[in-house]
Image (cartoon, coloured by chain):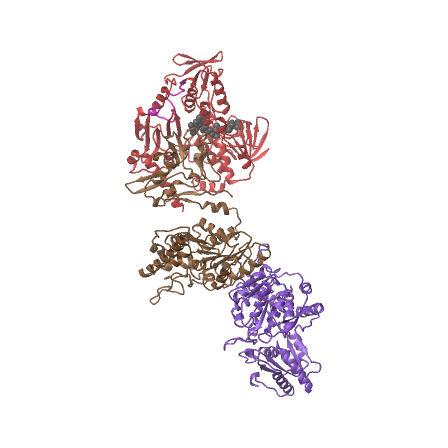
Chain colours: A red, B brown, C purple
């Protein structure tokens, strides 16, 4: 078959790209492929499915009608096995060939399995797809004990979910000796860790998994200090890697840890774009291209890709020729996340992990007994990062202060005193100002 | 065409920080007196007297919706409101990362995110906002109702930059539709191609140049014959103030008295702008025109304007309305009423229509001039319907804005003396008094009126 | 059987409109026309005429509503005179340019001032150059019949011009005569299908801009000229169509009226009088008397005054040596009658020049008697013998 636009992946990156394409081109043939045989959903929802917080039926992001209304051919349950950029053809696992004019790869990421002896051969779970969640839920019906490997978002979420299901949960760290080390600093990590402990999650950050073995349908997990834990359910959540195995060398698409893209989400090959977890794109802070693997970046990049694919190229080119950037282009990834655990809410954005030794000015406020923490990171007169646990700050307002590089000259102290009111006012005024200059 | 949406508009310069909106919101949304529950927040800074109501803007492309992994947020295509579905929400709060303005935020008392939902189209906060810093603007209905209708005028009319008439013509014609015959008596309108030039015309409905004097009569004959033939053709006049209030008045008055089924729109630009800005009977007192010049012996126009809307009301017609394009929803509402009324009898719509060229103001201020004219009661917005016998203000102004401010916007008034300004104020006040009396006591109010000037 | 009823001239005109089944009638009173308005109003009130009665606020609107109705496709009628005609002049002088076939009676009235509300042709003569077809009637039968025929002429696709059916105030408007009313179905057949706006309509089913600005550029100027030439062509065609219509009317009804001009007792005439309107009766009586006395006189009645029937007149005038022209109006500047001026304009087309004497009389509702007419005959006879009177002869001074 033939199509003008082909999008691989029907999650945040793919859906937003499709939406954007339809803004500019209402009729061009648009095809979306997903290897999963279901309507689009977000992997982020999966821990809540495991926890049982929300019904699986409710969480799909689009219905069939959306695809008919928007004239999108949605091929679900079809996996892309190869991409031939020379003939502009994609081959699916059932042998179907799709000829495209413009291709966007939004295949996200897949769990990495650490090189722990015996793990590959053993019975374990991961949590990336709905199918994975279903399998976990099935196993949890009879299981009494679970071991969760990894203290990143997936691991922490899953540990809480399984614990709430009534399982005895043992959480074991991956490479790094901390919880959520990608987002939260030591102070925050300690608070979060304590809450998990208080809620009956066993978690000693000193140990790692040394070896795994399957015995009588159970998993025998040997820890680094020698202790052996027998468990009914072993979940591996030790990180993700870009899903790009269908790109052979012959495709010519340059890859590093992910598919390398520019600020318009173009890959090194003409007519091929990539966005979301799979893409390795600009960093907000540095010149290196990075993987962020977070939801907000997926839709942001998807939108830029869609625009670049279907929008007015001359506008984009004109910007580039004068050495500027189209305002629609990708501004670079900023790390950001929210994390809600046992009724506590937290967020971390930007350079949240840095310290004063790195040359930053840091304002912290810590109330361990009430599990409250606030960290504001300044680089000169600019806010560059923040962490909040159980504080009333608006993560989006803070993020955008960072993104739009709001100058706080002379106002830093006041800002640190009442960041909520002041951040809201600053963003609010910047919006009114933008309107004023635009008018 | 897509949808446009009604808006909860915020005018921070009017906000006095009273916080009534927060109380009202907390009450209606959580039945609580704790304003933590309010979805609208008033930012306050006592240091510099800053007040700014913050509330969800119901973005066109809401990032909160895109951020939601649970499908719990969606933009309602009908209302434009970004809706939050409690059953789907898992409280991950990723949505709050997307919003730069705290339009959606975490309510710790409810352990969930909350956001404004416009109270289903009738926001409580607006009702309690004394200084009118919050307004629920329904202009979107204009786009939704009219957007798909054909623009019955060709693009690129030859009007001056900033001309109000072009907006007016396009909106009126679009509204009344193609089953219309348009009479455009001499003036700018036919000149910019409503009827055409050397064989080309700018309008897609049948249109003609009546005489300046006989617009209402020609339409009357036309409408009557179509009616006799069983055809419902709208007879539409878009006439200037000269063609309505001066030399065209006799035929207008006659047609009104006979109840001819005509929709007569007077585009009042307060003079003969097309022929070079001469005075007409609707030129205001004191105004400069090229025939009421300002010099040592003459201070501009010596008489008050003829207040046509009341004159027409006294003809006992089906409908009289005053309108401006700057309040386009109100404008369309009145066009609709006038249109309906014109199927039963005579309908008269008097539109205050500033002329950038003749009044001497920059073309980008056309809307502002209209709004100021309304705000100062120089041009009060009201309507009268014979069916109900009621005269009603549609944009009541109890505390008129500064007239000096309005006059200073317009070159034609720049020379006015204090006394002249006082005179204009009195005239405006007197007219509003008459209208008030009529709106409160019906038409009898006019007789009972004791006007203090 | 056609019925004969006694009608005054105003009623006769109204009957013509009734027979033509007009759709829109606009009325506004003025002496001596009011009877037309009243008669039409009564027809409509009694359901004998299915038309819109537009009782408007002045003559200006009278003609204006008819213009609107005509563009919508209506057959239209009204009548006026004198000051009314003066007041409606603005829309009046636009009708022919619109090429809309309105028919309007002019119940001829003298012009003020001095103040006067009685007959005279000053009104009709003053507006004759504007482009309407003008036909003057001699009696009430001719009024009824001419109104009907006027529609057939005006609506002829080669003509498309408005028609004034003129008849004298007082003398015809108030004079009662028996009038034979032709059967309605004959009139229906005679007039046939109505289509008055095939060329220019204000109709959403056929959208067009009526009367756009024209001129200024060479192309625009050429367009304007084209319209003007078209109007002239319509007038020219009317000279062909008017006799055709009269012939057809005669065939269908037996009513015989001269379409352009009428020659009376012209067989061996050596001189003639030229008359127009209701004075024709007195003129014919005078010719009969003179003939008895042996004077070789004939009479020329001008029925169609616009377009002016030059060719017909050339033939007629060629037969005589001198003419007296009787006018009921004054052309200031020439200080003679309007009709005199038209005859004078025709004389150069004759083989040999003939003397033309101007008589002015019957102003302000006064009578032109047989005696007056005999005097005009005598003057013509003398002129034919070389005794020419150069000055205008005012009949009241005879
Ligand atoms: C348990 C869990 C919790 C998370 N929590 C958070 C969080 O709190 N905050 C946050 O910001 N992010 C979180 N994330 C990450 C977030 O879900 C991802 O960043 C986001 O989903 C990336 O979107 P994407 O469109 O790039 O790819 P994905 O969501 O991974 O979707 C990839 C799509 O591609 C399809 N696909 C892949 N390969 C093929 C193929 N070969 N052929 C056809 N189709 C293919 C898949 O079917 C799918 O439709 C979480 C992820 C997980 C798994």
- Is residue A173 covered in magenta? yes
Q: Nearer the viewer, residue C345 or B171?
A: B171
Which quadrant would residue B29 be assigned to in this image? top left
Q: Nearer the viewer, residue B316 or B375?
A: B316
Query: How many numbered marks does the figure carry?
Result: 0
Residue B5 at what x, y percent from top left? 46, 42
- Is residue C250 covered in magenta? no
* Residue C125 appears in the figure: yes
Residue B176 at what x, y percent from top left? 52, 52
In the image, residue B271 above or below residue A339: below
Q: Quadrant of the C terminus of chain C?
A: bottom right
Q: Is residue C392 left or right of residue C240?
A: left
In the image, residue B157 above or below residue B115: below
Q: Quadrant of the N terminus of chain C?
A: bottom right
| Most common SS among magenta residues | loop
Residue extent of the magenta highlight: A170-189
Which quadrant would residue C199 be assigned to in this image? bottom right
């Amino acid at each position: 078959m033939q199509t003008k636009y082909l999008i691989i992946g029907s999650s945040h990156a793919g859906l937003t790209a499709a939406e954007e394409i339809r803004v500019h081109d209402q009729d061009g043939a648009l095809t979306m492929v997903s290897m999963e045989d279901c309507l689009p959903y977000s992997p982020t929802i999966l821990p809540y499915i495991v926890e049982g917080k929300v019904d699986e039926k409710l969480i799909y992001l689009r219905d069939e009608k959306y695809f008919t209304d928007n004239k999108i051919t949605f091929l679900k349950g079809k996996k892309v096995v190869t991409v031939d950029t020379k003939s502009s053809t994609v081959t699916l696992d059932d042998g179907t060939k799709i000829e495209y004019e413009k291709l966007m790869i939004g295949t996200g990421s897949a769990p990495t399995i650490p090189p722990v002896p015996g793990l590959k051969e053993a019975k374990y779970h991961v949590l990336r797809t709905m199918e994975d969640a279903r399998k976990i839920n099935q196993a949890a019906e009879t299981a009494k004990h679970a071991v969760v490997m990894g203290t990143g978002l997936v691991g922490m979420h899953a540990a809480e979910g399984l614990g709430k299901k009534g399982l005895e949960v043992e959480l074991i760290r991956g490479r790094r000796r901390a919880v959520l080390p990608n987002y939260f600093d030591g102070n925050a990590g300690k608070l979060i860790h304590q809450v998990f402990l208080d809620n009956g999650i066993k978690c000693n950050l000193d140990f790692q998994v040394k070896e795994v073995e399957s015995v009588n349908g159970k998993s025998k997990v040997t820890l680094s200090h020698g202790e052996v834990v027998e468990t009914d359910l072993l979940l591996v959540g030790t990180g993700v890697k870009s899903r790009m195995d269908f790109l052979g060398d012959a495709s010519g698409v340059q890859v590093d840890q992910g598919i390398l893209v520019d600020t318009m989400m173009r890959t090194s090959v003409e007519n091929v774009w990539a966005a979301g977890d799979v893409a390795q794109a600009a960093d907000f802070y540095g010149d290196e291209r990075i993987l962020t693997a977070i939801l907000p970046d997926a839709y942001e990049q998807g939108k830029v890709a869609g625009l670049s694919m279907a929008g007015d190229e001359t506008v984009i080119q004109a910007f580039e020729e004068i050495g500027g950037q189209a305002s629609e282009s990708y501004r670079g990834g900023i790390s950001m996340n929210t994390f809600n655990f046992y009724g506590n809410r937290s967020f971390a954005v930007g350079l949240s992990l840095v310290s004063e030794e790195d040359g930053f000015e840091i304002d912290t406020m810590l109330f361990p007994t009430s599990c409250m923490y606030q960290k504001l990171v300044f680089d000169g007169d600019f806010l560059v990062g923040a962490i909040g646990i159980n504080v009333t700050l608006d993560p989006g307002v803070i993020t955008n202060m960072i993104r739009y590089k709001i100058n706080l000259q002379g106002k830093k102290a006041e800002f640190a005193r009442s960041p909520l009111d002041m951040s809201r006012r600053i963003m609010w005024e910047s919006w009114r100002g933008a309107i004023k200059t635009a008018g | 065409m897509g949808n446009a949406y009604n808006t909860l508009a915020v005018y921070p310069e009017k906000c006095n920080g009273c916080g009534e909106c927060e109380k009202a919101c907390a009450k209606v949304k959580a039945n609580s007196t704790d304003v933590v529950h309010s979805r609208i927040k008033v930012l306050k800074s006592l240091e510099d007297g800053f007040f700014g109501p913050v509330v969800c803007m119901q973005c066109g492309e809401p990032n909160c919706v895109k951020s939601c992994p649970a499908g719990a947020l969606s933009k309602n295509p009908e209302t434009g409101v970004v809706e939050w579905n409690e059953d789907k929400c898992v409280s991950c709060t990723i949505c709050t990362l997307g919003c730069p303005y705290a339009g959606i935020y975490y309510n710790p008392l409810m352990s969930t995110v909350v956001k404004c939902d416009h109270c289903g189209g009738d926001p409580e906060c607006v009702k309690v906002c004394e200084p009118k810093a919050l307004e629920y603007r329904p202009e979107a209905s204009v786009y939704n109702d009219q957007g798909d209708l054909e623009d019955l005028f060709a693009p690129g009319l030859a009007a001056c930059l900033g001309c109000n008439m072009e907006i007016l013509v396009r909106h009126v014609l679009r509204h009344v539709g193609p089953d219309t015959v348009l009479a455009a008596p001499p003036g700018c309108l036919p000149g910019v191609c409503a009827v055409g030039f050397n064989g080309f015309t700018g309008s897609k409905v049948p249109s003609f140049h009546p005489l300046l004097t006989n617009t209402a009569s020609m339409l009357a004959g036309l409408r009557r014959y179509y009616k006799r033939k069983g055809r419902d053709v709208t007879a539409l006049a878009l006439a200037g103030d000269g063609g309505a209030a001066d030399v065209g008045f006799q035929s207008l008055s006659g047609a009104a008295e006979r109840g001819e089924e005509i929709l007569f729109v007077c585009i009042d630009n307060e003079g003969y702008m097309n022929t070079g800005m001469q005075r007409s009977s609707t030129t205001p007192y004191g105004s400069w025109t090229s025939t009421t010049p300002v010099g040592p012996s003459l201070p501009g126009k010596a008489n008050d304007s003829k207040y046509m809307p009341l004159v027409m009301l006294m003809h006992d017609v089906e409908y009289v309305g005053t309108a401006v394009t700057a309040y386009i929803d109100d404008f369309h509402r009145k066009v609709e009423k006038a249109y309906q009324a014109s199927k039963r009898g005579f309908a008269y719509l008097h539109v205050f229509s500033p002329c950038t060229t003749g009044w001497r103001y920059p073309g980008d201020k056309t809307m502002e001039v209209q709004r100021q004219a309304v705000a100062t009661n120089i041009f009060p917005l009201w309507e009268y319907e014979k069916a109900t016998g009621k005269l009603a203000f549609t944009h009541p102004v109890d505390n008129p804005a500064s007239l000096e401010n309005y006059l200073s916007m317009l070159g034609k008034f720049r020379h006015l003396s204090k006394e002249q300004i006082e005179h204009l104020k009195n005239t405006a006040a007197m007219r509003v008094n008459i209208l008030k009396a009529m709106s409160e006591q019906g038409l009898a109010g006019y007789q009972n009126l004791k006007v203090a000037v | 059987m056609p019925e004969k009823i006694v009608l005054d001239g105003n009623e006769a005109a109204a009957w013509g409109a009734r027979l033509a089944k007009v759709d829109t009638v606009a009325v506004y009173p003025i002496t001596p026309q009011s009877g037309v308005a009243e008669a039409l109003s009564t027809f409509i009130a009694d359901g004998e005429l299915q038309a819109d009665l537009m009782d408007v606020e002045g003559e200006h609107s009278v003609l204006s509503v008819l213009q609107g109705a005509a563009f919508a496709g209506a057959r239209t009628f009204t009548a006026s005179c004198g000051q009314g005609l003066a007041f409606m002049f603005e829309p009046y002088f636009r009708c022919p340019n619109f090429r809309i076939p309105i028919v309007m009676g002019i119940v001829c009235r003298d012009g003020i001032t001095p103040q006067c509300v009685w007959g005279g042709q000053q009104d009709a003569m003053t507006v004759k150059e504007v482009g309407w077809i003008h036909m003057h009637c001699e009696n009430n039968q001719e009024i009824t019949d001419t109104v009907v025929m006027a529609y057939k002429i005006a609506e002829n696709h080669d003509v498309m011009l408005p028609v004034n059916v003129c008849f004298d105030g007082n003398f015809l408007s108030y004079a009662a005569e028996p009038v034979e009313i032709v059967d309605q179905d004959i009139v229906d057949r005679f007039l046939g299908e109505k289509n008055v706006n095939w060329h220019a309509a204000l109709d959403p089913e056929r959208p067009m801009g009526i009367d756009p600005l024209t001129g200024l550029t060479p192309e625009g100027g050429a367009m304007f000229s084209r319209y003007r030439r078209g109007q002239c062509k319509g007038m020219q065609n009317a000279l062909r169509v008017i006799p055709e219509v009269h012939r057809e009317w005669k065939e269908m009804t037996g009513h015989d009226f001269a379409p352009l001009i009428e020659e009376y007792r012209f067989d061996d005439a050596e001189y003639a009088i030229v008359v127009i309107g209701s004075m024709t009766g007195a003129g014919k009586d005078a010719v009969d008397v003179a003939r008895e006395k042996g004077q070789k006189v004939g009479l020329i009645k001008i029925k169609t005054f616009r377009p002016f029937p030059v060719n017909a007149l050339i033939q007629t005038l060629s037969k005589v040596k001198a003419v007296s022209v009787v006018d009921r109006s004054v052309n200031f500047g020439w200080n003679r009658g309007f009709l005199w001026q038209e005859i004078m304009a025709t004389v150069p087309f004759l083989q040999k020049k003939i003397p033309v004497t101007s008589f002015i009389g019957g102003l302000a509702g006064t009578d032109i008697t047989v005696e007056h007419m005999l005097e005009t005959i005598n003057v013509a006879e003398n002129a034919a013998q070389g005794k020419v009177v150069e000055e205008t002869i005012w009949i009241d001074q005879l």
